[in-house]
Amino acid sequence: MKFKNLGVVALLMMALVACQKEPAKPIVSGEIWPDNEGVHVNAHGGGVLYHNGTYYWYGEHKSEKTSSALVGVMCYSSKNLTDWKNEGAVLKVVDDENSDIVRGCVLERPKVIYNEKTGKFVMWFHLELKGKGYSAARAGVAVSDSPTGPFEFIRSGRVNPGKTPVNMDEAALAAMDSLNLEDYKEWWTPEWYKAIDKGLFVKRDLEGGQMSRDMTLYVDDDGKAYHIFSSEDNLTLNIAELSDDYLSHTGKYARMAPAGHNEAPAIFKKDGKYWMITSGCTGWAPNEARMHSATDIMGPWTKHPNPCVGPNKDLTFGGQSTYILKVPGKKDAFIFMADIWRPKHPIDARYIWLPIQFQEDGTPFVEWMDSWTMDWFDQK
Ligand code: DGJ
C-alpha cells in the first residue's frame, strides 16, 4: 500500500473511533451512585426534568442522622442519566426562624417543571413546619429563571381552600355536608372509612384548605400542569390543576381513591391513558405498590394489580415510588424511580430505577433487573 493510502486509512480509522458511541453505563439499583465528585447522589424523593438536552435531577438533601431539611433541595445535571454533576442546593433552607423553610423543617418530594409561557422553572414540594411533626401538611412553591437555581421561595400552605372536588356532584356534596366529625371520634372503624369516602375530612378542611403531603407534578400535552398529592391525612389523593403560570392552584381538583391510603404518587401517560403508581402508607418501610389508570386525569380511575414483578415484588423491591420519567427521543421509554429509605442513616438512602415494560394489552409492569443500561430501550 502506498504511503498516501495508508494516511487515508488512518484518517478513516480515527473518524470511525470518534463516531463510536461511548457504551452506556449500567444502572444498578440499590448501590451507591457516585456523582462527578465521587459522592453518593443526595437527591431523595425526587424527580427529573429534561430541558434543552440536559436532565436535571431534583431531590431532598438528606443528612447523616436526620431526615429533616438541614440543607434544602439538591440538583444534579446529566446528559445521559448516568453521569451526574452536583449543581448544589438550588432551594436552600434559611436560618430565619420566622420563615416556613427554616433549617430543621421537613421538606420532601420536590419536583420541578418548566413553564413554556413564562420561561420560569417552578418547584413544588411537601412542607412541614419545624417542630410540628407532620401536622402542617402544606405544599410549598418556589421559582427560578434557571434550572440550576437559585429558586426563590414564594409561599407554603394548604391547598384549594373553600373549593369542593369536581368529582363530587350535588348529591355527594349534600351527603358530605350531613357528616359530623363528632360522630366519628374513633378512627379505622368500617363506619369511619365510609365517612372518609364520603368526604368527612374534605369537609373538615374545606375552610382552611386540603392537606398536602407526598406529591408529584405532571405537565400534560396541552401544557396544563397538575399537582398530585396525598390529602385527607394521607387517606385520599388529590389531583389539582395549576394556574397557567404553575404558581398557584385554579380550584379545580378531583379526589382519587378516597379512603384508599395512597402515598408516593408517580404518573405517566401512554397512548392517551394515564397510569399512576403509588404506595401504601407505612412510614419509611416499603410496602406493595399500587397502580391505577384513567383516560381523563380527573378520573374516574381504575385500580390494577401490583405492577412489580420479580424478587421482593410485594415490597416494591424494598423501595417507594417517587417519579416516572419519560425518556425523550425513545419510543415508549419510561423509567420508574423509587427510593430505598434508610431512616437511621438517611444520607445513605438508595435509588431504584427500572424501565417500565408493557404487556400485550398495554398494561405496564416493572420488572426487577440487577443491572441495565439505557440501550435497553433501543433493543426491546
Ligand atoms: C412516607 C413518605 O412517602 C415519605 O416521603 C416520608 O414522608 C415518610 N413517609 C415519613 O415517614
Image (cartoon, rainbow, N blue to C red):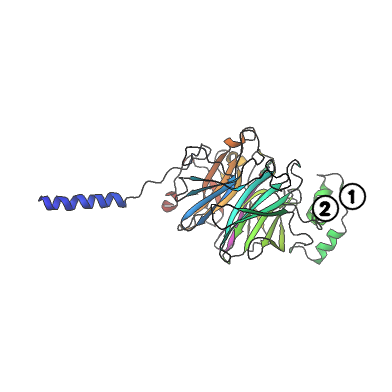
Q: Amino acid at mark 1?
A: Asp
Report the residue that reaches farthest toward the left. Answer: 2
Specify the quarter for ligand 1: top right
Please identify the quarter of the rendering in which residue 134 is found: top right
Specify the segment rendered in magenta.
269-279
Instruction: Report if residue 298 is visible in the image.
Output: no
The answer to whether marks 2 and 1 mark residues whose Cβ atoms lie closer than 8 Å is yes
Residue behind mark 2? 195
- Outermost residue, front direction? 96
Marks 2 and 1, how far apart at CA? 10 Å
Q: Position of residue 169 (x, y in %)?
A: 78, 65
Q: Earlier in the sequence, mark 2 or mark 1?
A: 1
Q: Residue at x 88, y 54 (%)?
A: 180
Residue 141 is at least partly visible in this image: yes
Q: Which mark is residue 66?
A: none
Callout 1: SS: helix
Please tell me how crowded label 1 is: few (under 14), some (14-19), or many (20+) other residues with Cα within 10 Å: few
Residue 342: where, in percent of width, then height?
Answer: 61, 35
Q: Which residue is mark 1?
A: 183
Element marked by disc 2: helix
Where does residue 243 sit, x and y in percent of width and height? 66, 64
Going by the numbered disc 2, the residue's amino acid type is: Ala
Q: Residues within 10 Å of mark 2 (few under 14, many from 20)?
A: many
Chief secondary structure of the magenta portion: strand
Residue 258 picture location, percent across and down? 74, 54
Does 81 lie within the magenta span? no
Q: Nearer the viewer, residue 292 or 353?
A: 353
Task: Looking at the picture, tell me which residue is in the foreground, 152 or 29.
Answer: 152
